[in-house]
Amino acid sequence: MAAPCVSCCRGLSYRLFLGLRVNFAQTQGYWQTLPVDAQTAPESQILRLIHTTVVTTKKNVSASGRDSYTEDFIKKQIEEFNIGKRHLANMMGEDPETFTQEDIDRAIAYLFPSGLFEKRARPIMKHPEQIFPKQRAIQWGEDGRPFHFLFYTGKQSYYSLMHDTYGKLLQLEKHNDPFPQKTESMNLIGSRWLIKEELEEMLVEKLSDQDYMQFIRLLEKLLTLQYGPAEEEFIQRFRRSVTIQSQKQLIEPLQYDEQGMAFSTSEGRRKSARAEAVVYERGSGKIRVNGIDYLQYFPITQDREQLMFPFHYLDRLGKHDVICTVSGGGRSAQGLLTSDPRVRERKKPGQEGARRKFTWKKR
Amino acid sequence: MAPFASVLPRLLCAGVRPSFLHKAAPGPALQSRRTLGRAPAPEVSEPEDRDDLQSKLLELPLQQPDFFNIKELFSMKTLFDARVHLGHKAGCRHRFMEPYIFGCRLDQDIIDLEQTVRHLQLALNFTAHVAYRKGIILFVSRNRQFTHLIENTARDCGEYAHTRYFKGGLLTNAPLLFGPTVRLPDLIIFLHTLNNVFEPHVAVRDAAKMNIPTVGIVDTNCNPCLITYPVPGNDDSPPAVHLFCRLFQITINRAKEKRRQMEALYRLQGPQGAEGSGTGDTSSRADSSCSS
């Protein structure tokens, strides 16, 4: 008997039949009777009229649904990753036991050199936890009862978080009721609240901007009360450390010249001008550029103001001497020390300048 | 008890997973009374003794008017002390609440506590039966003052709460929102029927559409129409809301405890047979009679 031929077109449902060869005609229609081949083998049984329902789905449902990876799939991926890691270590001649993620990255960069600019498009080999997005397991048990008591709200993790935070707030308010004091909170400096994307990733749920703002407001309110170490730890879960920009800059130690006077050297550039400046500790506010007094080197007042600005900001106008050498560039580029990355944008064909287009004529 | 009887088969026929609920023992007797067709409960063939036990388990509470002894939980005095009789001003009065209002004093409506006691007993009895049959109970409210309390109450009972923004098709479009095999609540309890703009909560209408029975505390400015078991009472004072939460929590816990006891009793008596079940009945009746 020929096996029934099955069509894979989406939404086609059929009732299984036994041992008959059938030719399918795939046309759009609601009810369709299939022509059954009458010349079948003598031992073939009942000729049945087969009805097929062609359900035309309007919605564009993707083949795999919403990316849902089963637990088994993820486990298999993790096993494959570990085996692949060992193979890679052997290939590179390293010890498979002590092969870290950085080693993997270096090995992949060596074996698959890529000239692509987008870093995320280059070949990567990372643990499946970092590649596959975090999924939510099925939320209810065998009897159909959901596990979480806020399941029917739709955003159970977010609302449960709000519930817990509010509970902590009430508890603290109860303790603080007689005398609301506030201890200093130095731990907030150098850290920032989670951003919305990080919170979404933490809760594995979509949030709206208002939800996020509401949560941050609640946490801020919590901060105004006096809290203990447990609440401290709870709040720290939602803070991320931020590099303090001022600490990033290297401040070179002062150098001392022959007379024992401290001075400091620095370099800067703008466009194609290069400058080097030496600032002395004690002085009377004299500035010499390339051996010439700045009053003569920069006849324009604006350039001199730019030079004097840092001293003016620190109220040390007449206290330091500066000797600098500058080369290249033009009048206004030579005035500045902090790097200004702006350079002249090139003119493009089809336009009059870098941005200006030709006059548009309607006809 | 008419609305209660008509609602039971819904629990049996609603395609709920556990096999014991597929049993249609009380079903056909009640279905014959109503004309409009409901889907008949699927007949599943199971071993005979298990059938018997399950049917006894489910039928026994229905044979007594107050199986869970709800009457002892509260009296009119407790309601009065919790300020349940205080309604809104006469200008806020809803037309359909007039039967439940005792009178008006200094322009403030007073709710008739005798009616409240009757309605509350019916509502608590129904809740207890739903909890006994392992139904899902959802507490709904949109009053921000009591959100935390209601969520705590629900969590302590082992049931569910929804005191947040109610998304559009939550009940009517649940398979799309949650998943194809989601189970909807079997009872919705409204502690506040109105939402934050003093309009009827969407869930009242949606529950009626999805054939989900509702219990609701209706104040003098609420519409009691679509609620299966309305309980006229104050929903704004903290003592009143605390009292209602406590009452619901106690009934649900009591019903679940009773269920565990009955199951344990029948499991013990399973191997012993009929005489064991006979003694079991009398002992449970003795329990309920001496506690009442």
Image (spheres, coloured by chain):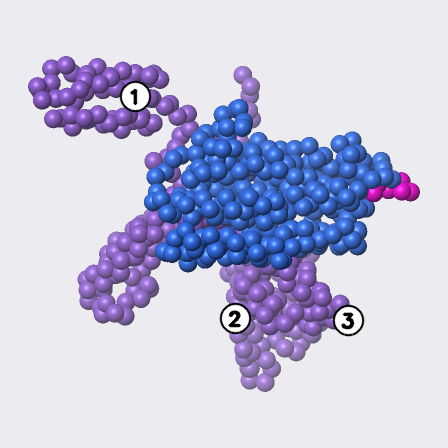
Camera-side residue of B4 and A135: B4
Residue A307 in picture, x, y percent from top left: 64, 62
**Residue B142 within the segment the image draws in magenta:** no
In the rendered image, residues at marks 2 and 1 fall on the same chain: yes
Residue B19 in picture, x, y percent from top left: 40, 43
Q: Would you say B64 lies left or right of A135 here?
A: right
Residue at x 15%, y 25% (from the top left corner): A19
Bin the neighbour count of mark 2 within 10 Å (Cα to Cα): few under 14, some 14-19, many 20 and up: few
Q: Would you say B263 lies left or right of A332 here?
A: left
Camera-side residue of A260 and A203: A203
Instruction: First in sequence, mark 3 or 1: give its number.
Output: 1
Residue at x 31%, y 26% (from the top left corner): A13
Task: Name the quarter where the C terminus of chain A is drawn.
Answer: top right
Marks 2 and 1 in Cβ contact (< 8 Å): no
Instruction: First in sequence, mark 2 or 1: give its number.
Output: 1
Chain of the residue under label 2: A
**Residue B106 within the segment the image draws in magenta:** yes
Badge 2 element: loop
Q: Which chain is blue?
A: B
Q: Amino acid at mark 2?
A: Leu
Disc number for residue A250: 2
Q: Amino acid at mark 3?
A: Phe
Residue at x 61%, y 54% (from the top left corner): B289
Residue at x 18%, y 18% (from the top left corner): A47
3 vs 2, front mark = 3
Residue B261 in picture, x, y percent from top left: 50, 57
Chain A tint in image: purple
Distance between mark 2 and mark 1 Cα atoms: 77 Å
What range is drawn magenta here? B105-110
* Residue A145, above or below B268: above
Disc number for residue B146: none
3 vs 1, front mark = 1
